[in-house]
Amino acid sequence: MSFTLQIGDAAPQFDLPATDGKTYALRAFETDPVLVIFFTCNHCPYVTGSDEATRRVAEKFAARGVRFVAINSNSANTYREDDFPHMVERMRQHRFPWIYLHDPTQEIARAYGALRTPHFYVFDRDRKLIYTGRAVDNPRNAAKATTHDLERALDEHLAGKPITVPVTNPIGCNVKWEGKDAHWMPAEACDLV
């Protein structure tokens, strides 16, 4: 069995606290036609280098029923700035157009098979996976990106077309797993393509 969700897999359930003081389960988004769940954090240069590109895509597709939900699963014992108070401050400062959830047990990161930050998962109305991987090919400096894989996947899906490239390798820092070296990844985790 693959570490990361495969195309056609159902979105795993979650019930996680958010920076807005609420708790959200997967069912909270059941009216959204398309759900983009992405694993992110506060400190990673691939995240901070592509946040504004992600914001642009989230804002572009919001009126078309695409909801973005971010999840931070990183161990704050590896990087203190990935703790929940820093998440709250980051959302206060940047006012990103997504819900920002905290996965302190890392159970949700394992359920989805999150490899890196950022790592995107796109689910259709039935909450089946239709795209996974990166948003752009240069997240550390998104202004220099030459491919916009997430945006293309959303455009194709919303146009009723098959997604031409449904799986790409996420580019970024590895998820920081509790009790492990900062660069450790589960043995079963590997490139997607």
Image (spheres, rainbow, N blue to C red):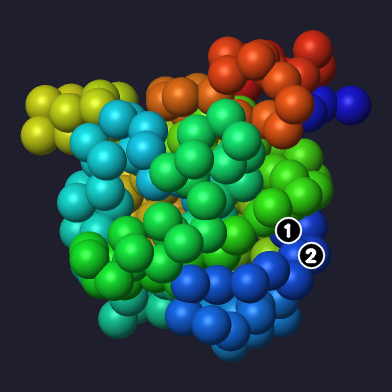
The residue sitting at 65% across, 80% down in the picture is: 23
Q: On the rendered structure, is 132 left or right of 89?
A: right
- Horizontal arrangement in the rendering, residue 93 relative to residue 162 (left or right): left
Picture residue at 46% right of the left edge, 24% below the top: 173
The single residue placed furthest to the right in the displayed view is: 1
Residue bearing mark 2: 13
Residue 85 in view, yes or no? yes
> Where the C terminus falls, by quadrant?
top right
- On the image, the x and y values in percent for residue 120 come to 50, 45
> Are the residues tagged 2 and 1 within 8 Å (C-beta)?
yes
In-front residue for pair 190/51: 51
**Residue 167 image offset from top left, x and y in percent:** 54, 31
Q: In the image, what residue occupies the spot 30% across and 30% down?
A: 45
Task: Please name the amino acid that badge 2 sits on.
Answer: Gln
Q: Position of residue 46 (x, y in %)?
A: 32, 31
Q: Secondary structure at mark 2?
A: loop
Q: Which mark is drawn over residue 11?
A: 1
Q: Amino acid at mark 1?
A: Ala
Residue 35 versus residue 189: which sits nearer the camera? Answer: 189
72, 11: nearer the viewer: 72
For the residue carrying disc 1, how many other residues have a C-alpha within 10 Å: few (<14), some (14-19), or many (20+)? many
Q: Nearer the viewer, mark 2 or mark 1?
A: 2
